[in-house]
Amino acid sequence: MDDAELLERIASGKLVEGPEHANEQYLEGLKRTLIVSADTELISAPSYLRAARSAPRMQNYISVMGIIQDELGHAHIAYRMLRDLGVDTDALIYEREPREFRHPYAFDVPLDSWYEMVVANAFYDRAGFVLLTDIFEHTSYGPWKRALVKVDREETFHLRHGERWMTTLAADPDHKPKLQEAADWMFLMTLEWFGLPDSLKRHMDQLGYGLKGLSNDELRQTWLRTAAPFCDSIGIETPVHRDEDTGEYVIDCPFPCEFDEEQKRWLLEDGPIEWDQVIARWKRRGPANVEFVRALQAGRREQNGLAA
Ligand SMILES: [Fe+2]
Ligand SMILES: [Fe+2]
């Protein structure tokens, strides 16, 4: 199918059902988007598994196991679609180097407490929800649109789990400072997740071909429109405010900013940095990148006689 035919098909609201309805450029854009989504879902499993060790009670541990099971299901859906598009997903999952995974840097920073676990649910799963809802509403790729009905419902459950716990912990003066500490690094981490501002963004074909609907800045605002009022409602401070004239959220601290991985602290006192420096940090990957990817690959590599 040539480009004009494809764009006409998409513009008329017809969905692309497979490679026969698309062209090379569309498929490359689709695969790139699917890999980021699949990797993100998959890597959340070892990340949440590590954090589940901090669960205060057995039933809370079980809740996190349920969330992990959902995430593995979400990853499976995205990898299966990649396989249907001719991608060698075995090589993708088991043979890639950890730094080649495409999940956001946020998931390379390990979650070390129950506070960080539940803030991850409220912030990171909300980011997942925002990104996937946009794809659900706007994607021109039929198989993905249909699969996302189930995924979105489960992400809603994950973020409500985070909200319920944050509400409980914020109401207790013994717990609130530690919850605030977790929110302090994880709020900006989630804002960074949405990527380059629109003024610097590449890969505009994701929009042109109807693979997604909203731009990075619009998605960041969508996340803020629910995350910031939620934090306000439980007395957790955030570095943003809503501009009454435009209705847009404004970030009140240096952003983007350098992150101290050891201390899990933004170096706000050093002022803002360039996005090039952020991208360099993302490319270096974060402290738990190797641990998490190797945890997913270990069994398969052992079976194949590869070094774990
Ligand atoms: Fe998920
Ligand atoms: Fe989730």
Image: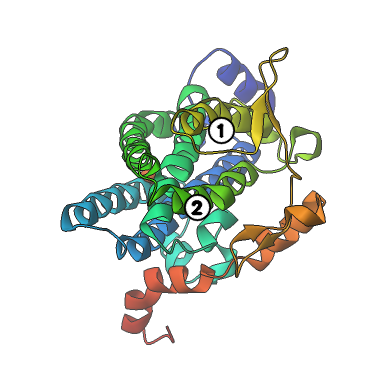
Front tag of 2 and 1: 2
Q: Earlier in the sequence, mark 2 or mark 1?
A: 1
The 10 Å Cα crowd at callout 1, few under 14, some 14 to 19, many 20 or more, is: many
- Tag 2: amino acid: Ala
Residue 247 x %, y %: 66, 16
Residue 60 x %, y %: 22, 52
What residue sits right under mark 2 in the picture? 182
The one nearer the camera, 286 or 249, is 249
The 10 Å Cα crowd at callout 2, few under 14, some 14 to 19, many 20 or more, is: many
In the visual, does 180 lie left or right of 46?
right
Residue 96 x %, y %: 52, 69
**Quadrant into which the N terminus falls:** top right
What residue sits right under mark 1 in the picture? 22
Mark 2 and mark 1: span between their CA atoms?
44 Å
The one nearer the camera, 92 or 106, is 106
Q: Secondary structure at mark 1?
A: loop
At a point 43% along the width and 28% down the height, the residue shown is 142
The one nearer the camera, 151 or 20, is 151
User: Which numbered dot is residue 227?
Assistant: none
At a point 60% along the width and 30% down the height, the residue shown is 219
Q: Secondary structure at mark 2?
A: helix
Residue 208 x %, y %: 67, 27
Q: Quadrant of residue 204?
A: top right
| Mark 2 in CB contact with mark 1 (< 8 angstroms) | no
**Quadrant into which the C terminus falls:** bottom left
- Tag 1: amino acid: Ala
